[in-house]
Every structure is written in C-alpha cells, then in structure tokens.
Image: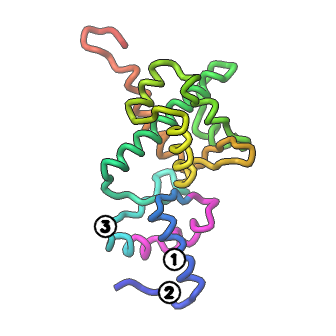
Amino acid sequence: MLRLFDDEGERKEFRIAIWNLLRGHNIIQTDVEFPFIQENHELIEEYLDLMGLSLTSHPMGGLYYLQKEGSQEESRLSAQMCLIFFIAVQKISDSLEDSDTVSIFDLINKYDGYELETLLSLGGLDPTQINAFRDVNINTNEDLEKILKTMTRVRFLEKLDDSNYRFRRSIIRLSEVANSLHSYEHIQIEGGEEE
C-alpha cells in the first residue's frame, strides 16, 4: 500500500515530480523537483512501478529519469536526439583551435551555450552528416528545430535568451551513446586494415 502525504505541500511536490517525469523530463540537481525525488525515491519508485515504469538514477548521480519499453516512435526520437548530439559534438570539436576533442564537462559548463540551429543547419553539414540526418527523418532545418525543441522540453538542452542552446547535465545520457558510436570508427576490419 502506498504511503500518502498528509501535508498538502508534499502532495503538490509529489504531483509536480510525477508529472514532470511522465512528461519525459530529465531531473538534475538544479531542478526544483530533485530534492523531493531524492528524499522520496522509494515511494516514487513504488508508485511508478504500478504503471509499469521505472525511476532511474544515473550511475554518476545527480540525475533522475523514467525508463520504460519504448514504442517505435520513441525509438526514432531517441535516435534523432542521439544523432543531433553526436554531430553537434563533432562540429564543436572541429571548431576548436587546438584540434582537441570537447568533453562532456566542457559542453555543460559553457554557460553562453552554442548556436546549434546554425551549427547543425543542413546547409553546413557534410554529405555523410546529411545522410545520417535523413536516415532518422531529419530532412529540413524545421525538422531539426523541432527535435531541438523536444530536447529542450525533456531537459537535455536549455534555450537561452539569445537563441543559443546550453547543454544540461542530463545530456550525459546521450554522451554514453555517442561515445559508443564513436568507438565504431576504430574497429578492425577482417583483413587487418582499420577503416
């Protein structure tokens, strides 16, 4: 049996936390819901379990999100967000003067953000990147902007007043996928040559 909150304020915090998790938000330490979820983790987990959902705490800490079996539409959206992140990191790394790669912490700590709409505009991508976008149904800049808006809604990004996007700590979820994709560039092909 679920324990109910006696205090109206706690009931309101519970509703807000559940609602934002159900909307797909990634809750990080700076979000108002975080302390409540952290303090009431077991109760929230039990509640979500009744709906077939799982509250997940990222292994690095400081991040909560829902885990569930995804539909085909959710899988496509996940692929789009991962690809946008992967190509953004490529483009940002390419723009660095010292030819160094950008770290997840560099991305998160750049408080003035990045001009992602310009950086990822289809007119500025190489053919391989354009084809990768097409593979996940990002065919126009409007499609790109729609996905960036979704990434903002689920709190992977924050849109700043100057229209730049700032990466939020929850982007670490996409970073892990991007790192695994990057490692495929260095797999040995049978016959001994690296591709």
Q: Is residue 94 above or below residue 13?
A: above
Q: Position of residue 103 (x, y in %)?
A: 59, 34
Mark 1: give few (<14), some (14-19) or many (20+) Cα within 10 Å: some
Q: In this picture, which residue range is highlighted in magenta? A: 28-45
- Compare marks 2 and 1 and give the one earlier in the sequence: 2
Q: Is residue 63 left or right of residue 107?
A: left
Q: Position of residue 93 (x, y in %)?
A: 60, 25
Distance, label 2 to label 3, CA atoms, is 22 Å
Q: Is residue 16 left or right of residue 181?
A: right
Q: Nearer the viewer, mark 2 or mark 3?
A: 3
- Compare marks 2 and 3 and give the one earlier in the sequence: 2
Depth order, front residue of 43/143: 143
Which numbered dot is residue 5? 2
The amino acid type of the residue labelled 1 equals Phe
User: What secondary structure is marked by label 1?
Assistant: helix
Residue visible at 57% across and 58% down? 28
Which numbered dot is residue 65? none
The residue under label 1 is 14
- Compare marks 1 and 3 and give the one earlier in the sequence: 1
The residue under label 3 is 52
Residue visible at 34% across and 58% down? 68
Residue most extreme to the left:
190
Is 32 inside the magenta-drawn segment? Answer: yes
